Image (cartoon, rainbow, N blue to C red):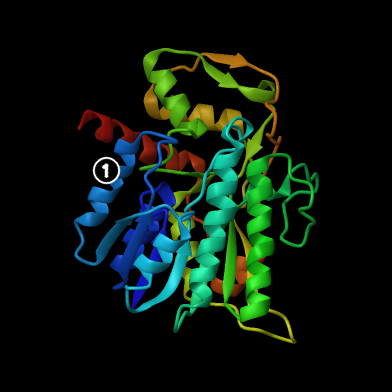
Amino acid sequence: MTVLVTGAAGFVGMHISLALMAAGETVVGVDNLNSYYDVSLKQARLEKLGAHNAFEFIKMDLKNREEVFDTLGKIPGITKVVHLAAQAGVRYSLEHPFDYTDSNITGFLTILEYCRHLKNLEHLVYASSSSVYGGNKELPYSVDQSVDRPVSLYAATKKANELMAHSYAHLYGIPLTGLRFFTVYGPWGRPDMAYWTFTEKMLRGETIPIFNNGDMKRDFTYIDDIVSGAIAVLANPPVPEDGKAPYRVYNIGNHRSEPLLNLVAALEASLGIKAEMKMLPMQAGDVKETFADIDPIRKDVGYEPTTTLSDGIPKFIEWYKGYFKG
């Protein structure tokens, strides 16, 4: 069988593609290789994927729907889709709003339309985000909570994705599952994330910015745990029950809300460097704390994260030093 993975040159996309191929699947990867962060990192991920005969890469922007329909329409055997392509980043959305509607709204609609005409489609799994919870105060975040008050445009586009997905599941019977990712980190990660930028600055002897004066918590989730959960979900499509659409949304996190300063401490221990910190106020669009209730995904597919921050950060640092040394 063949799985289409959009955003295949991305952090999560690369790891999921590798896991799918390890399980015997053929992967068709799509990515537009945009310059949101260093394209050479994306190309290095693609080189790692391209070492496998079961991988085919297509450079393509999903907002160009006619190209997508024409190109993907010629590829036989696609039965599952993992849609990860998106414009990420809460802070970036404050300055580049149209990038988010182009990628996260128009691009997602293109995939939905492609999937509704795809013969033998078994499941479409797509990336949502913990950002949809906005300023919710009730912790841990549960998929049963209202997510109608996003505090960033990025979060609003991810909430829109969930609504669009439900409508397509209802109208066309497409099995659809959204995954609300919680602060994913690890080897081959994203350079715009705090664990990466802190590492860069600490190695250069620079001060690291600590927002909300350090009063921040995150549900840090190691990439291997994300991948195991996503693969398990992909293999278990929802079915319509009691007149409801074949549609689900899950939190996929570590079920641990840890202070931001724990991340700093883990980096200090792994790097052998004392961080110089500058305390700053909360940034616009940010939230104070995230914490995932994972009971539904645990119950339905047996998801069980196993990697703590103190175990995961040294693995990232080992990769980081090897990548830049090479």
Front residue of 240/301: it is 240
Residue 123 percent location from the top left of the image: 50, 75
Measured along the vertical axis of the image, is residue 244 above or below residue 248?
Answer: below
Apparent side of residue 191 relative to residue 248 in the rendered image (left or right): left
Write the residue at 38% across / 15% down: 204
Label tally: 1
Q: Is residue 303 shown to the viewer in this render?
A: no
Amino acid beneath label 1: Ala
Q: In the image as oriented, which residue stretches furthest toward the front?
A: 66
Measured along the vertical axis of the image, is residue 129 above or below residue 175?
Answer: above
User: Which residue was labeled with disc 1?
Assistant: 44
Apparent side of residue 34 relative to residue 292 in the rendered image (left or right): left
Residue 245 percent location from the top left of the image: 68, 79
Q: In the image as oriented, which residue stretches furthest toward the bottom?
A: 242
Write the residue at 66% across / 78% down: 171
Measured along the vertical axis of the image, is residue 208 above or below residue 249?
Answer: above
Q: Is residue 286 shown to the viewer in this render?
A: yes
Front residue of 70/158: it is 70
Residue 212 percent location from the top left of the image: 69, 24
Which element carries disc 1, helix, strand or loop? helix
Front residue of 227/114: it is 114
Within 10 Å of disc 1 (Cα), the crowding (few <14, some 14-19, many 20+) is: some
Where's the C terminus, which quadrant?
top left
Write the residue at 36% across / 33% down: 38
Residue 225 percent location from the top left of the image: 47, 56
